[in-house]
Image: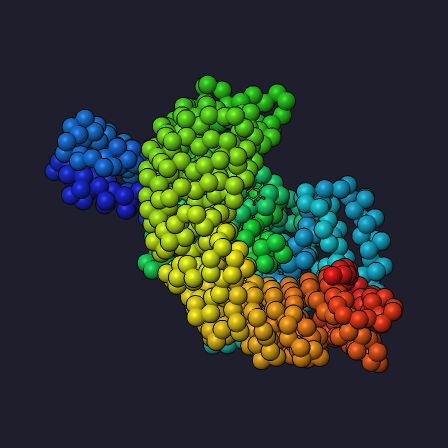
Amino acid sequence: MEVVLGALPSLIPKLGELLADEYSLQKQVKGGIRFLQSELESMQGALEKISGTPADQLDNQDKIWANDVRDLSYDIEDSVDTFMVRCKGRKPANQPKIRRKIATEIRDIRARVEEVSRRRDRNKIDAIVAKPATTAVDPRLLAQYKKATEIIGIERARDELIKIITEENEVSMQQGKIVSIVGFGGLGKTTLANTETLDERQLIDELRVFLQDKRRIFADDNCPHEELYEVSDKILKKCAGVPLAIITIASLLASKQKTKMVWYDVYNSVGTGLEKDLDVSTMRKVLSLSYYDLPSHLRTCLLYLSVFPEDYKISKNRLIFMWIAEGFIQDGKHESLFEVGESYFSDLINRSMIQPVDDSSHGFITEHCRVHDMILDLLCSLSNEEKFVTIFNGVDHLAPPKVRRLSLQSCKADHGPPGDSMNMQHVRSIVAFPSAYHLMPALRRFKVLRVLDLQDCDLSGRDLKYICYLIHLRYLGLNATEIDLLPEEIGSLQSLQTLDVTSTKIPRLPLAVYQLRRLICLRLDMSIIVPNGIGSLTSLEELSDFHIDSSTNIIEELGHLTELRELQMVYHTKHEGTLVKSLLCKLQKIQNLDIYVTGNCNLDGWVAPLHIRKLRLLGCWFSILPDWMNPSHLANLSALSIRVREIQQKDLDILGMLPALRSLGLKVDHENICNIGRVISIGACSFPCLKEYVLWGYSGLVTFQHGSMPWLTSLWLEFTVQEAAKITYTETVLGLGLGYLASLQKVFIQIRSRGSIRDGAVEEVEAALRHVAEVHPNRPTLTIYHT
Ligand SMILES: *[C@@H]1O[C@H](CO)[C@@H](O)[C@H](O)[C@H]1NC(C)=O
Ligand SMILES: *[C@@H]1O[C@H](CO)[C@@H](O)[C@H](O)[C@H]1NC(C)=O
Ligand SMILES: *[C@@H]1O[C@H](CO)[C@@H](O)[C@H](O)[C@H]1NC(C)=O
C-alpha cells in the first residue's frame, strides 16, 4: 500500500550531518540523534518491505504503523531543517535558545519514535512481500505502440466514437489494418488523436515476437518458450487489446523470470473475469501492478505527478527541480542531483508510467511528459489514500489533519478556499493553477514550505514581501505570472535552489539574488536587466532566458559558473566574439548550449565537451566543420544548429553518422562561392534518427538516397532557381529523392531567384515541387518561400 517512505530517505543522512562539529550539540543531544538514526533506519527497512504490497493485502495495523512512521518522518525533518536554517551563518554555541529548542525537540521526537516502535511490536508485521527492483521495456515495443497509446481514452460518446472508427475502418482496411477500440469507449478522457492502430490479434502477435526476442536474450535460462504461450495469451486477453495495458504489462513481465509460474502469478493478480472487455477496475489492476513493482524512490517521484491536472504537459526540468526541492532525490556518487533526477525521469518513461513528449520546438528532445488519464486517476487515488497530496479539483475529499502537499487545480462553484480550519503549517509543496488561484491561502499561513509554484497565475500588482519568512523555500516558480516586482527580501531565502521568473514583468534582478548561494537553476527573462555580480552564483547548473549587452562585463563573470549544464542566452556585442569563445572553453560541464550572439563571433578552435547534447549556436561561425564533430566525440548529441562557412559532401557524411542526432540545422555561407552545381547526396542509412533537417544558404542541391533519414518529418531547404531548373528537366522530375523520405510530413522550400532567370522558370520549379509532394505517399504539406 504505502507508496512512499515519507521523508525518511532524505532525513536519515541529515541526522548524520547534525552530528558534525559545526553544530556543536551537547553529548546528550547527540546520543538522542544516534538513537533516532538507527531506529529510523530500521523503520525505513521495514517500510520499504511493506511498501510494495497492494493496499488490499495489508492488514490495518500495518497501514496505521506505516502512516505513523511517515508522519513522524515529515515532522522530524521539519524540525531538523528549521534548526539547520536557523544555525546558518551563526555559531550554534552562541545561540543558547536555538540549542535548547533542538534539545527539547529531539527528546520529544525520541519519545514519539519509541511509542511508534512499541505499537509496532505489539502488532508484529508478518507477511512481507519481496519484490524485484528493476524493470526495463524494450524501446522497440514502445516505438511500436507509441501511436497506439494515443487512442486510449476518449471523451466523446461511445456511439460517436464507433462512428468515427467505422469510417476510419474503410481507409485502414485498405492498408491492411483494423481499428479496434471496442470495450472502453467513454472510459478515458484524452482526445482521439490517431485512429490508426493495430487490432488485438496483431498486438498479440507483436508481443509474441517481442517476447521471443527476449528469449533469445535469455537463451541460457533453459525455458522452453511454448510454455509461455498459453499464459501470455491469457494475459493479453485480459488487456483486451488496450495498448496502454499491454505496454505496462510487457514492461512488468520483462523484469520477471521467464517461467510459466511467475507469469501466472502476474496473471492471477490482475483480477478475474471480464476478459473480453477491459473494465476500469481490471485496467486499474494492470496499472497498479506496474506501480507496485517500482522501487520506492520512483514511486514517490511518480506520485508527486498528482499535483498536475489531467492532460497537462509537464516540463521535465520543472518536475525534476521540484523533486529535488522535496528531497526525493538522493545524492549520486558522480552525478549532480539533477542528473540523478533525469535518470529517474527516463526510468519512468521506460516503464511506461509517463509518456514522453518530444516536439519540434525543442529539437525533438524529450523536454516534457504527460501522464495518461488512467495512470493519473490511479495516482490521484493513491495520493488521496496516502495523504500524499491534497488535491482541489472539484472532487470533494476530506483533507487530512496534516496537509503535506496542496495542489489547487480547479474548483466547483460551491467549493470554498481551504478554510482557516485547514492547517497549512505542515505544507511542503503548493502548486496552484490559474483556474484555482483564488483558493490560494495567504503565504503567512505556511511555515515549512519547500515548493511554491504559481506558474501561469496572474500575480500582477501582487506583493511577495511575505516570502522572506518562508525560510525553507527551495523552489520558487513564478513563470508567466505577470509579477512585476521581486522583493529585495528574497535574499533571506538561503535554501533556494530554483528561481523561475521567465515571462514576468520584473524589470531588474534584485542584487539580493546574488546572496542565494545554493541556487542551481535561475530562469530569467530576456527583458530583465541583470546587474553585475552573477559570477557569485557558483552552484548554478541552469541559467536561461538571459540577456546581456556588451556594456557590462557579465560575459566574463559567467566564466565562474563552471557547474553550468544548461545555458541559454542572448549576447549583444559589437566586438569580435573572442569573449564568447573563452567563456565556452571554461564551461566544461555544459550539456545544453543555446546562445545567440550578435556581432561577428568566430568559434574556430573551441571544442565542445564530450557529453554535449544540444548545441545551438546562432550568430557564431565556424569556418569549416570542426574535426571534433564526429560520432565518437558526439555520441549523445541530439540537436545541432550551427553556422559553417562552407560544407562539403564529407561533412554531411560525418554528421549522418551521429547516432543520437534528431534535429540538424545548418546555415552555410555559399553566397560568394561560385562553383554552383555541386550536389550533396544524403546516403542510405545515414541520419538514423533525424526528425528535422534544415539547410540554409547552400548553393548547390541536396538529394536523398533510398533509406536515408528514415524518421525525417520536417525538411527545410533553400535553393536557386537556376540549380533547381537543371534537375526539373531530368526524367525524374526534380529528382531530389524526396519520395524516399518515408516519414516526411512537412516540407519548407525557399527559392532564391538571383541573377537572370528565364521567364516562367520559377513557376516551373514550383509546379515540379508540388508534383513531388502530391505523389509522395504521405502527401506532406509543402510551403514555398521566395527571396
Ligand atoms: C531507458 O531506456 C533507454 C533505451 O533503452 C536506455 O538507454 C536508458 O539507459 C534507460 N534508462 C533507464 C534509467 O533505465
Ligand atoms: C513557462 O510558462 C509558459 C507559459 O505557460 C510555458 O509555455 C513554458 O514552457 C514555461 N517554461 C518552463 C521552463 O516551464
Ligand atoms: C551519454 O548518455 C548516456 C545515457 O544518458 C550516459 O550514460 C553516457 O555517459 C553519456 N555519454 C557521454 C559521453 O556523456
Q: Residue at x 69, y 78 (%)?
A: 676
In this rendering, would 64 be left or right of 736? left
Q: Residue furthest right?
A: 760
Residue 572, x across and y down, in percent? 50, 51
Q: Is residue 217 above or below residue 465?
A: below
Residue 61, x across and y down, in percent? 39, 36
Residue 221, x across and y down, in percent? 47, 74
Q: Is residue 295 visible in the rendered structure shown here?
A: no
Where residue 132 sits, quadrant-wise, is bottom left
Residue 143, x across and y down, in percent? 62, 63
Where residue 516 sits, quadrant-wise, is top left
Q: Is residue 123 above or below residue 767?
A: above
In this rendering, would 742 be left or right of 468? right
Foreground: 751 or 420?
751
Q: Residue at x 82, y 80 (%)?
A: 730
- Quarter of the rendering occupied by the C terminus: bottom right
Foreground: 548 or 706?
548
Q: Residue at x 55, y 25 (%)?
A: 438
Q: Is residue 160 visible in the rendered structure shown here?
A: yes
Where residue 233 sits, quadrant-wise, is bottom right
Q: Is residue 415 above or below residue 338?
A: above
